[in-house]
Image: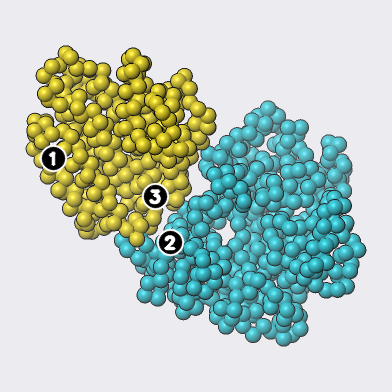
Chain colours: A cyan, B yellow
């Protein structure tokens, strides 16, 4: 064990236990690793970047020069999960995703959960993602969130927590797929030694799952096949690569708002043969921009009138408009109640303990313990606008205290979790860094499908707990071992 | 396929072709300039700018013509929206937009070329580095076309790519010929020895046809021979006849796929009729300049009609 590893051994390390022994999940990998020449690994580590650049797996950082394209750093050491661990996680994820869909249905219908007094009415009244246009409307198949990313963190051998639900538009699945492709190209011998569950059929599953959600279960393509399209804001969007990648892999059309128009009560795309109807739109455009007639009137990214077509049953929009209420951290704090209310079971995956600053007692506690806590904006995402008490300077804490006192409703606080670490490859060998995990979940009338693996994000800076790519985080290939 | 994708595919290949032709023009001019005195060399560089239609823009930035200023303006100057660097940016952006209708191999060829070129053009290009830049641009074109040939479905997207390539190539060859047409006037061709055969050689080099021409004409360079070769020879892939034929084939394939002919097919048929039984004497009788202007006008009209027929924009 390196000195650095020892120093960090207060955290659960996924590869080594406190005595420095390799854990079961990593045994085969470590055997292989020890047989590798360092010079060769260093070379591969460098090659990986070139591969990503060549294939164009880049993203634009918000607020930077449009021409500037960056890579999300990729680490060549995989994050490994055993088959048994994965089974347990899958059950918890499926339960949570079912509850999310039931909750969304209920929120836009009778709101039984509010009537039952399990969540306060104010919860959605103050939620910016709440869409009055969705009230009383049931999306095709009753599904709101078709593609979900559940962010998990680990703190011990059997301790996984849900950190965040991404029910609106989870991104990053292209990295799950490309990371695996890159690993297989670089280390083919590794995959013949370690049995790893494949992730590569995700695009096919996504295509099938989306097609199964077509209105009235049928499509307008040849032979009643549903026409699926991916709606992107365009080539300058930070996630354009992923939009094009998924459309390409699914064999779906990649459309922009300017390609679409409502014709004869259907949303249709302009092809070289004229307008053709779309049955299922996997949109990667926010609610606000989806329909200038219903939402932001200045939007040129959406389709005027699409909401009317949607409400008349002429198209499926995935994920459904208004789904974003679940990404709100105030709602997150009620998830244990929400899961229990709709499934009648105890949550299999626990939440991280959360103080709602809207509540005066909680606020008092949070203000007293600011140096120990992580404070997040209720509607924030991407690691922006948060305070990590233990690593913040005194000045940062003081400034945040003012913001918090001025608008306590905007914040929630959580204990600073001792996130697990997984080694990354550095010039000096393996070094532990904090990781999280985002498995990707598909929901259709045919059921819930979870791809074994997901996106592991890793904080590349020593000691850092922020794994977001917008804040300098990287990614790893994520393996679920076969039994 | 989506009209917008067809548009992106068409323009991706037009810009790729334009970048390649521009590079050849620079290459031929450099060779020419190296063998001339200062004043003639200046004329050479002036004619490069004129051929590319950049005179006004160039003269706003510079007060004279010399090699380094001209090739840097043409290759990389930010004041020149039609620089090769900008064109390659347009190739790549169109390739990104058309990402789902080109193969990964085509995309990677474009992306790699762009990365390398962007790096090479980040700084002013010295005379020593010019050869590498030009070679890279030519090789990029070859790589992309090779990837298309070996990995793309022969579907609509393929044919819009071909249409873009041949519309642009025909335009470029006609433009280069037109710029030098005064050298090729038949009245001058009678005084063979007094003519600067180096100029003709340069015309041929600009369209990568010097070797092919020599093989076909046993080293005899004259106006008739060159015009016949660049206008009428269906074997030479940058001749007007070849471009016209290739464009016609691609438009016919599209019409078959769509089960109907459009305005572009009509214009194409008219343009074809002009080539029917055409001889080099006919071309000179009508006037080479008039012939070339007519070709370019028709070529542009066909491009417009393709854009309308296949709903690229609306």
Q: Tag 1: Cα neighbours inside 10 Å, few (<14), some, or many (≥20)?
A: some
Q: Is residue A263 left or right of residue B295?
A: right
Who is closer to the viewer here, A182 or B180?
Answer: B180
Q: Residue at x 27, y 51 (%)?
A: B304
Query: Is residue B158 at least partly visible in the picture?
Result: no
User: Mark 3 — residue?
Assistant: B8
Q: Nearer the viewer, residue A39 or B201?
A: B201
Disc 2 from disc 1: Cα separation: 40 Å
Is the C-beta separation of discs 2 and 1 under 8 Å?
no
Q: What is the quadrant of residue B39 in the picture?
A: top left
Mark 2, residue position: A258
Q: Quadrant of residue B26?
A: top left
* First-in-chain label (3 vs 1): 3
Chain of the residue on which disc 1 is drawn: B
Say which residue appears at 18% left-offset and 14% top-offset.
B194
Q: Position of residue A40 (x, y in %)?
A: 65, 29
Percent x, y of residue B37:
33, 14
Q: Is residue B188 above or below residue A199?
A: above
Across and down, in percent, residue A205 comes to 53, 60
Marks 3 and 1: CB-CB under 8 Å?
no
| Residue at the spot of label 1 | B275
Q: Nearer the viewer, residue B155 or B233?
A: B233
């Amino acid at each position: 064990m390196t000195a650095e590893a020892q120093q960090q051994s207060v955290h659960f390390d996924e590869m080594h236990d406190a005595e420095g022994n390799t854990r079961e999940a990593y045994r085969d990998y470590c055997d292989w690793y020890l047989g590798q020449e360092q010079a060769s690994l260093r070379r591969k580590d460098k090659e990986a970047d070139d591969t990503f650049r060549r294939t164009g797996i880049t993203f634009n950082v918000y607020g930077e020069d449009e021409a500037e394209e960056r890579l999300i750093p990729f680490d060549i050491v995989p994050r490994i999960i055993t088959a048994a661990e994965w089974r347990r996680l899958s059950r918890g994820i499926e339960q949570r995703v079912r509850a999310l869909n039931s909750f969304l249905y209920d929120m836009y219908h009778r709101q039984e959960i509010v009537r039952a007094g399990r969540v306060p009415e104010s919860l959605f009244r103050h939620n910016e993602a709440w869409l009055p246009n969705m009230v009383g409307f049931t999306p095709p198949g009753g599904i709101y969130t078709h593609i979900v990313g559940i962010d998990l963190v680990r703190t011990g051998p059997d301790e996984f927590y849900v950190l965040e639900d991404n029910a609106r538009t989870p991104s990053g699945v292209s990295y799950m797929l490309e990371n695996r492709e890159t690993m297989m190209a670089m280390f083919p011998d590794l995959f013949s030694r370690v049995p790893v569950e494949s992730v590569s059929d995700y695009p096919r599953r996504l295509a099938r799952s989306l097609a199964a959600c077509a209105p009235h279960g049928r499509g307008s393509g040849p032979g009643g096949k549903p026409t699926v399209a991916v709606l992107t804001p365009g080539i300058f969007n930070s996630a354009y690569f992923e939009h094009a990648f998924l459309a390409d892999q699914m064999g779906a059309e990649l459309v922009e708002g300017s390609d679409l128009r409502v014709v004869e009560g259907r949303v249709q795309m302009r092809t070289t043969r004229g307008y053709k109807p779309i049955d299922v739109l996997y949109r990667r455009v926010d609610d606000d921009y989806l329909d200038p007639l219903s939402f932001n009137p200045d939007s040129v990214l959406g389709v005027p009138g699409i909401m009317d077509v949607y409400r008349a049953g002429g198209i499926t929009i995935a994920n459904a408009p208004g789904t974003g209420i679940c990404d709100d951290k105030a709602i997150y704090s009620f998830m244990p109640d929400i899961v229990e209310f709709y499934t009648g079971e105890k949550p299999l995956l626990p939440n991280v303990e959360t103080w709602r600053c809207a509540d005066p007692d909680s606020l008092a506690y949070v203000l007293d313990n600011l140096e120990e806590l992580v404070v997040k904006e209720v509607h924030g995402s991407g690691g922006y606008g948060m305070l990590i008490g233990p690593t913040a300077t005194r000045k940062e804490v003081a400034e945040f205290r003012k913001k918090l006192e001025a608008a306590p409703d905007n914040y929630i606080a959580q204990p600073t979790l001792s996130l697990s670490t997984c080694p990354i490859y550095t010039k000096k060998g393996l070094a532990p860094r904090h990781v999280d995990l985002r498995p990707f979940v598909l929901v259709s009338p045919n059921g819930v499908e979870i791809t074994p693996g997901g996106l592991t994000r890793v904080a590349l800076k020593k000691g850092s707990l922020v794994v977001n790519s917008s804040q300098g985080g990287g990614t790893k290939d994520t393996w679920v071992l076969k039994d | 396929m989506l009209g917008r994708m067809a548009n992106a595919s068409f323009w991706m290949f037009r810009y790729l072709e334009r970048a390649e032709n521009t590079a050849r023009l620079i290459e031929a001019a450099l060779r020419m300039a190296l063998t001339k005195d200062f004043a003639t060399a200046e004329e050479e560089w002036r004619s490069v700018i004129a051929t590319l239609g950049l005179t006004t823009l160039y003269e706003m930035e510079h007060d004279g013509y010399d090699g380094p200023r001209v090739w840097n303006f043409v290759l990389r100057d930010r004041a020149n929206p039609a620089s090769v660097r900008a064109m390659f940016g347009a190739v790549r952006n169109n390739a990104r937009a058309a990402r789902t209708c080109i193969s990964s191999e085509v995309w990677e060829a474009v992306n790699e070329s762009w990365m390398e070129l962007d790096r090479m053009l980040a700084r002013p290009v010295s005379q020593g580095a010019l050869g590498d830049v030009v070679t890279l641009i030519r090789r990029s074109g070859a790589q992309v076309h090779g990837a298309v040939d070996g990995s793309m479905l022969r579907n609509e997207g393929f044919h819009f790519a071909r249409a873009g390539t041949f519309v642009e190539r025909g335009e470029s060859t006609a433009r280069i010929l037109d710029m030098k047409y005064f050298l090729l006037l038949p009245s001058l061709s009678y005084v063979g020895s007094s003519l600067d055969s180096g100029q003709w050689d340069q015309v041929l080099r600009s369209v990568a046809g010097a070797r092919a021409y020599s093989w076909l004409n046993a080293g005899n360079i004259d106006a008739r021979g060159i015009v016949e070769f660049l206008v009428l020879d269906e074997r030479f892939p940058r001749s007007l006849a070849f471009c016209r034929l290739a464009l016609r084939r691609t438009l016919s394939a599209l019409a078959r796929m769509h089960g109907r002919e459009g305005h572009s097919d009509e214009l194409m048929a008219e343009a074809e009729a002009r080539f029917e039984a055409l001889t080099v004497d006919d071309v000179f009788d009508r006037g080479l300049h008039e012939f070339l202007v007519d070709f370019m006008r028709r070529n542009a009209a066909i491009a417009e009609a393709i854009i309308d027929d296949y709903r690229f924009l609306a």
